[in-house]
Amino acid sequence: MVCLEDADFIVVTEKDIPLIAKYLDLAQIEESNHNLVNMFLWREQYPLWQYHTEEYMLLLGIHKGKLFSYMPLCKEEFFEEAILKAQSIFNKHHVPFELSCFTRDRLELLQKILPKCSVTIECEAADYVYEGEKMRTLSGKKLQKRRNNYNHFVHEYDGRFVYEDMTKDHIPELKTFLDSWRQDSTEEYLVYEAKGVRDVLDLFGVLPYNGGVIRIDGEVKAFLIASLATDTMVQINIEKADPTIRGLYQAIEKIFLEKNYPTIEWVNREDDMGIEALILAKRALNPSHMIDKYRIRANGTT
């Protein structure tokens, strides 16, 4: 496989966090793969490189052994310039020009620049998006089961549980809690995720996220990490809870959103990765809409 590092792409490290954050703020992308916390959460499984000018940033990734470019991080006026630069680098190294994690609006812009490109929708990668108000209140008939679970938890553990906003002091306890959370799993994505969650915890105060913790009888039993995707959308990056405690997942999310994002319009709970349990759980929450994602291969040069 060709490495394009000699073409000005450099490996993304912790030092790049403020820089990437600046370009993400310009782009205002709601799609979950273009989220800084997610990038570091999955960087061992999906390595990442960056190239930037004053106007835009290009991110280079690998999926199933193939190099691809993410959507350019820039204002719309510099989108074409960024795409053509990315294509020129791929062409220079005789690597098929592939792009991934594209949303419908950026795809339409791309097709004006590369009209002969072939497009594939990534069915298992669509993000589930929910109304912020419903996630905070659990209102409505379709959320009755979730509301019942939350009410059961509050009643069952009244006086025994406490919610705390995450601080650096929580990190050692959260790692200990992770040691007991599905530690017997050999599923590939969970193995990578376990390492990634620890990396994200180690970057508390460096990565732009906040979190919440629930203790029961003094012990950590759940925690959640989230970050802003755009000015109107928060993304739930990590959510872990003792699965034997009914209503705990509902409680950590509801209380966290109430305290930290009382007016946010949208909540992105990411994709389901084609995992049946996640599909059922995310559909049951009655998403407002999905964010479809597309993979593109360009034919020829422009």
Image (tube, rainbow, N blue to C red):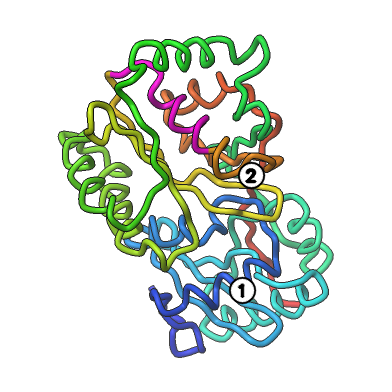
Residue at left 66%, top 42%?
Answer: 292
> Magenta includes 246?
yes
Mark 1, secondary structure of its residue: helix
- Give the residue type that dot 2 points to: Ile
Marks 1 and 2 sit apart, C-alpha to C-alpha, by: 29 Å
The residue where tag 2 is placed is: 121
Q: Position of residue 115 (x, y in %)?
A: 80, 63
- Give the residue type that dot 1 points to: Lys
Q: Nearer the viewer, residue 76 or 232?
A: 232
Magenta segment's dominant SS is helix
Report the magenta residues as a range.
Answer: 245-256
Quadrant, the C terminus? bottom right
Q: Nearer the viewer, residue 281 or 171?
A: 171
Mark 2, secondary structure of its residue: strand
Position of 67 with respect to 178 (left or right) is right
The residue where tag 1 is placed is: 22
Numbered tag placed on residue 136 in the rendering: none
| Figure check: 110 above or below 132 | below
Q: Position of residue 188 (x, y in %)?
A: 28, 43
**Mark closer to the chain start, 1 or 2:** 1
Residue at left 51%, top 77%?
Answer: 50
> Magenta includes 166?
no
Q: Position of residue 25 (x, y in %)?
A: 66, 67
